[in-house]
Amino acid sequence: MILLKIVSIGADISGNDTSCSKELIMRLEADIPVLMDLGAYKAALTNITGDDVVISAFVEDGITAKINRAIIHILRENSEDIGDLEGISGTPEGAGEGISYAEAKIRQDRYPDAIILSFDTYGGEEFVSDVANSTIKAARGMDGVTDVSEEIKPGTRKIPGVGYVSEKTDDPVVAATIEDMESIGVVAGAMLGAALGNKNVYLVRRGAPSHIIPGSVIVSATAFLNGNIIDLAAPFEERTRILKV
């Protein structure tokens, strides 16, 4: 049986600390179809969060390492600043602040649908790991959820096909795979509620500059539905407006 999963890799490769240029985004989107040529079922630039980008792909288990390496190649070739890519090492001892990684399994009799959250910090605020983990705990075990990526833990992390990054990596990515489209709103609502319940956490639209007071964390939320991207910030902004009498 073929096991399908989602992989998401996030990195700061921007030339500044608050946003990603239109030129960078266009170059990344132009190169992502290479991932399908290499065997990915679908792939996209799913999240743009402050100065961080996330490339996600639905892949068969056997080519996870190959697709991960290809994503790193795309990030490296288009980087305005080597940034997080510099922290990748072939050994645990050499690992530094590097890329973020999330991986989750997909039920084989379902379309590949997922929710991806991406976090960005301005000064490496340490509480971001707690924020990301709260969203993972919120999604885990919910009806309509197949799998959720691993919690952020202290210590060096090995990324399949890529290498090692250290616990200094500070802009986590979270992925949850979904059983049916009707569950997207419920699961994303729980995850965002968990994130925004933490101190100094703000939801931003995909691609919006992160003009926030240092000491804060921003999060973007994307639904990746069979290859199509939906920025969840706009509909959630409308749904959370308090109706006045």
Image (tube, rainbow, N blue to C red):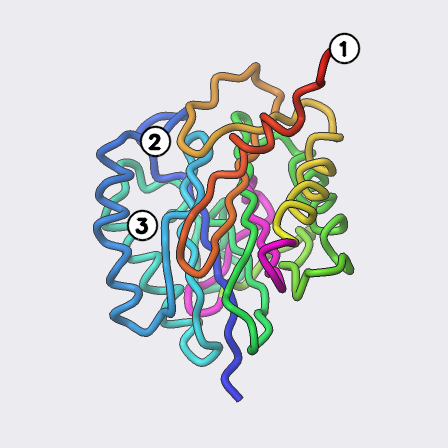
Measuring 42% from the left and 26% from the top, which residue is drawn there?
208
**To which residue does mark 2 refer?**
20
Q: Is residue 86 or residue 14 the one in the foreground?
A: 14
**To which residue does mark 3 refer?**
75
Residue 68 picture quarter: bottom left
* Residue count near mark 2 (Cα–Cα under 10 Å), binned few <14, some 14–19, many ≥20: many
Please provide percent x and percent y for residue 142.
Answer: 76, 57
Measuring 37% from the left and 48% from the top, which residue is drawn there?
45
Magenta span of residues: 160-182
Q: CA distance from mark 2 to mark 3?
A: 13 Å
Between disc 1 and disc 3, whose residue precedes?
3
Dot 2 amino acid type: Cys
- Of the two numbered discs 1 and 3 in the rendering, the one whose residue sits closer to the viewer: 1
Q: CA distance from mark 1 to mark 3?
A: 50 Å
Dot 3 amino acid type: Leu
User: In the visual, does 73 lie left or right of 196?
Assistant: left
- Of the two numbered discs 2 and 3 in the rendering, the one whose residue sits closer to the viewer: 2
**To which residue does mark 1 refer?**
245
Q: Compared with residue 109, is residue 25 higher up or lower down, i.e. above or below?
A: above
Please provide percent x and percent y for residue 245.
Answer: 76, 10
